[in-house]
Amino acid sequence: MTQNAVSPTNLIAHILSVAEGAGNKPFLVEGGRARLSFAQLEPRTARLAARLAALGEKPGARVVVQVDKSVEAVLLYLAALRAGMVFVPLNTAYTAAELEYFVGDAEPAVVVCRPADEAAVRAVAGQNAARSPAVVTLGADGTGSLLDDMPDEGAPLVPRGGDDLAAILYTSGTTGRSKGAMLTHANLLSNALTLKDLWRWQANDVLIHILPIYHVHGLFVALHGALLAGATVLFHQGFDPAAVIADFAVGTVLMGVPTHYTRLLDQPKASGALTPEACAHMRLFISGSAPLLTEAHQRFEQATGQRILERYGMTETGMITSNPYDGERLAGTVGYPLPGVAVRVRGESGDLAAAGEPGVLEVRGPNVFAGYWRNPEKTAQDFRADGFFITGDVATQAADGRITLVGRAKDLIIAGGLNIYPKEIEEAIDALPGVAESAVIGVPHADLGEAVVAVVARARGGVLGEDAVMAGITGQLARFKHPRAVIIVDELPRNAMGKVQKAALRAQHGALFVPKA
Ligand code: MCA
Ligand code: AMP
């Protein structure tokens, strides 16, 4: 349903029109140096879009991108939108084995990878795709074959409408296989415009950007806010708490996962104290992607005099709820549904839950994705007939509409803001020699919120060591999914129905990573 380029629901047209108004103002600043101005967005995305077109990209084609965070990587995202392509960013921690699946599933026309990964990516891309994609490189320092052979002429903006796909973001599935969430221009733009108003983005804001740019949080929630406000971004490659505290003197907004906030709180006083004075220039601290403990919320307020604003969202939906900007930011709650977003809570009986009663949260709105890529069955399973998407998060809704997340119906571990599905790890471990079966659980972890623990039953009469389990999954699964502890047992506990009792395992091993009082 392609409309014209200035369609009110074309994300990149919006971004470029804001950029035009912002002129020579810096957009991305790295290490104190202005790296990209708003005025440069138009010509640089135009040339990069022409380069992508020359690589064989056509509107609607996918570009799979697994590169380090850099100014050029941001330009690549915007250029892909401009070329009318579908941007498919991947976690840089994924192994070649994981990449093979994504390339096979997304069937991209182009894969952009780090220079060091080129040979491995070429092998994977050649093997699996029905049609071999072009493979080009982009390094953290902004060099690579993508930027060689840049055409002199830029490409005009390819018209795409609100219902056209802007991005596919993979999110792990309960079956152990990742599914691609199809996000349209209208999905991304509506959510970004809503958050711009709700969080009071202004042109004089300065965002401290510490998140990776391959997930909704860092790529969309953070960058779109700054882009639509014409605000400057202090771009950090990784997370160095002292460097972030130093930036509080000039910044106004920070977005992070709870691990970022607990690490800031645990920062030794000598390397930059977290004080009300140090934070006086900051107006907004936002947390999301994982539950922020009430204790961290309170400690942060005691230290800085400011209350973290916690919000809740998903890859499939963008942001769903937010604590209020002006009203009470209540610790342990994720606030109210965003304007234009409808939520409801369905109890175990299947009926809508009464106020305060727990149930699975469902959501409907312009932010909700267009379905799972090439997976109509899963899409049908996760949507109600009236268009509500079933999140799998267990929540209560108070009479005034405020949402509190109380658990998850889905078997999901969130470590440091990254989602990890136990099934994927269990399948990898179960395939190893000497293993009868395994149960992967999340247990409380002071730094990451939750940590992965694998309880592995050895095959009858077999010999199995923890090291063999770890060695067996290395190379198959990204590091962040690796268990922080492997416990070998003779058999897993089961209930009368024969089902593995994960709750019992969590109770038994729950104190593994909690510092003793
Ligand atoms: C790194 N490691 C991890 C994690 N990150 N292990 C478990 N969980 C993690 N999250 C491992 C590495 O493999 C490495 O292992 C060791 O920890 C140190 O790695 P390093 O790169 O130094 O880690 P770090 O820089 O300390 O990173 C921790 C982090 C990072 C800053 C918390 O994970 C992060 O940026 N998380 C944010 C993720 C995010 O953007 N989530 C949003 C998803 P080894 O030493 O063994 O090699 S979007 C979303 O959820 C929705 C839409 C929403 O609501 O936002
Ligand atoms: P993802 O699939 O990476 O988009 O992660 C989405 C999931 O992260 C949600 O379904 C929630 O389970 C969780 N999540 C996001 N924000 C919060 C939050 N503020 N508190 C608790 N869980 C959250």
Image (cartoon, helix red, strand yellow):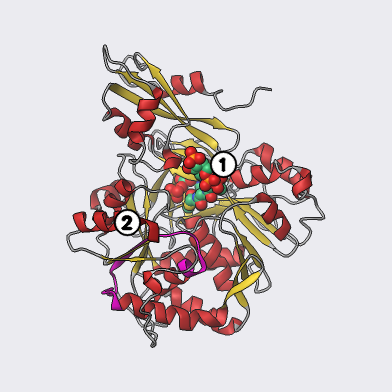
Q: Is residue 46 visible?
A: yes
* CA–CA distance in space, label 1 to label 2: 26 Å
SS label for mark 1: loop
Occupied quadrant, residue 426: top left
Q: Position of residue 223 (x, y in %)?
A: 54, 65
Q: Magenta stretch: residue 442 in it?
A: no
Is the C-beta of the residue carrying label 1 under 8 Å from the nearest atom of ligand 2? yes
Range of magenta residues: 54-74
Residue 291, disc: 1
* Image position of 97 (left or right of 254): left
> Where in the figure is residue 376, as x and y percent of width and height?
24, 53
Q: Is residue 74 above or below residue 356?
A: below
Residue 501 lies in quadrant: top left
Question: Who comes first in sequence, dot 1 or dot 2?
Answer: 1
Q: Position of residue 436 (x, y in %)?
A: 28, 21
Determine contact: label 1, label 2, CB under 8 Å. Answer: no
Q: Is residue 268 above or below residue 143?
A: above
Q: Is residue 7 visible?
A: no
Q: Amino acid at mark 1?
A: Pro
Q: Quadrant of the N terminus?
A: bottom left
Query: Who's the residue at 55% across and 71% down the image?
Result: 227
Q: Residue furthest left?
A: 130
